[in-house]
Image (tube, rainbow, N blue to C red):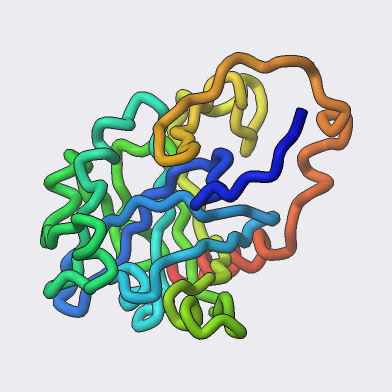
C-alpha cells in the first residue's frame, strides 16, 4: 500500500561529487555535493547560492568535478559541514557548518594540476572532469522564500581523467561498470553499488552512438592550449 508522505528531502540516491574551484587568492576550495546529473559531456549541478563554490564558479567560470569511490567515504565525510566562506553564511551557521581554509588537507586528498582549468584535481579520486560554466539557471523564481537561495549551473566538460583500474579491458575510452564503484548519497547516508542485477537492453546500443560534438570541441580546445 502507498500513502501520501512529506519527506523534507527527496534524495533517493545520486553520486557524490567533490567540486574543486579556485579562490580569489589562488588557493583551492573543495566541496562535496550530490545534486548532479549528466547528459553527454554536459552536466547540471545544484548549489547553495551563498557557498564559496558558487562564488568561485561565477567568478572564474571553471571547476573540476572529482568523483570519489565508495572506499573513500571517510575522506569525503571529513569535509562535511565545512565551508570555504569566512564568515560562515547564516544558513550554514544554522546547520552547524564551520570555516576551513584548506579542505584538501582536511579531507586527505592531494592537489594535482589540471590541464585545461586553474582549479586542481583531487589526485586520489578515480575520476576527474575539468569543466567550464556554460549557463546559470535560477530555481524557485516564483517562490519568495526560496528565490535566490539555490542555483543550478550548466557545465561543459573539457577534459576527463580516469584511473587505469576502472577502465574496460581491451577497449579504449570506456569505463568498466563492474570495476567502477561510485560513492552514493541517499537520504544523507553513504552507500556503494552492488553487483549488476541483470543485463540491460540499453547495452545493445553502442556507447559511441551517444558521442557528443562537445568531445570534439574539447579536443580542439586542448590542442590549442597545448
At 40% from the left edge and 58% from the top edge, which residue is drawn? 64
* Quadrant of res 119: bottom left
**Which residue is at 55% across, 39% downward?**
13
Counting from the top left corner in percent of width and height, residue 200 is at 82, 25
**Residue name at image x 41 percent, y 27 percent:** 70
Above or below 102: residue 1: above
Q: Position of residue 133 (x, y in %)?
A: 50, 74
The answer to whether residue 4 is left or right of residue 23 is right
211 vs 86, left or right, is right
Q: Can residue 137 be seen in the rendering of this structure?
A: no
- Along the viewing direction, whichever of 16 and 141 lies nearer the viewer: 141
Q: Relative to residue 208, is residue 152 depicted above or below?
A: below
Instruction: Indicate the quadrant containing the N terminus: top left, top right, bottom left or bottom right.
Output: top right
Question: Which image quarter: residue 189?
Answer: top left
Whole-percent x, y for residue 198 in the image: 77, 15
Q: Which of the 4 image quadrants contains residue 99? A: bottom left
Residue at horizontal 29%, vertical 58%? Answer: 120
Q: Is there any visible trace of residue 219 in the rendered image?
A: yes
Amino acid at each position: 500500500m502507498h500513502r501520501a508522505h512529506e519527506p523534507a528531502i527527496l534524495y533517493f540516491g545520486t553520486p557524490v561529487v567533490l567540486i574543486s574551484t579556485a579562490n580569489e587568492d589562488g588557493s583551492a576550495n573543495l566541496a562535496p555535493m550530490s545534486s548532479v546529473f549528466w547528459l553527454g559531456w554536459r552536466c547540471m549541478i545544484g548549489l547553495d547560492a551563498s557557498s564559496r563554490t558558487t562564488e568561485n564558479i561565477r567568478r572564474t567560470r571553471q571547476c573540476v568535478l572529482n568523483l570519489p569511490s565508495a572506499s573513500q567515504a571517510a575522506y569525503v565525510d571529513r569535509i562535511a559541514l565545512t565551508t570555504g566562506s569566512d564568515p560562515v553564511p547564516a544558513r550554514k551557521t544554522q546547520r552547524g557548518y564551520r570555516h576551513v581554509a584548506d579542505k584538501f588537507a582536511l579531507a586527505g586528498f592531494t592537489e594535482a594540476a589540471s590541464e585545461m582549468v586553474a582549479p586542481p584535481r583531487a589526485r586520489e579520486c578515480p575520476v576527474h572532469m575539468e569543466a567550464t560554466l556554460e549557463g546559470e539557471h535560477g530555481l524557485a523564481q516564483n517562490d519568495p522564500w526560496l528565490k535566490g537561495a539555490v542555483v543550478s549551473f550548466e557545465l561543459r566538460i573539457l577534459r576527463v581523467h580516469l584511473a587505469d583500474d576502472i577502465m574496460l579491458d581491451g577497449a579504449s575510452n570506456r569505463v568498466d561498470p563492474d570495476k567502477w564503484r561510485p560513492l552514493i548519497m541517499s537520504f544523507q547516508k553513504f552507500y556503494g553499488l552492488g553487483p549488476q542485477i541483470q543485463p540491460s537492453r540499453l547495452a545493445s546500443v553502442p556507447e559511441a552512438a551517444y558521442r557528443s560534438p562537445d568531445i570534439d570541441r574539447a579536443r580542439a580546445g586542448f590542442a590549442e592550449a597545448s
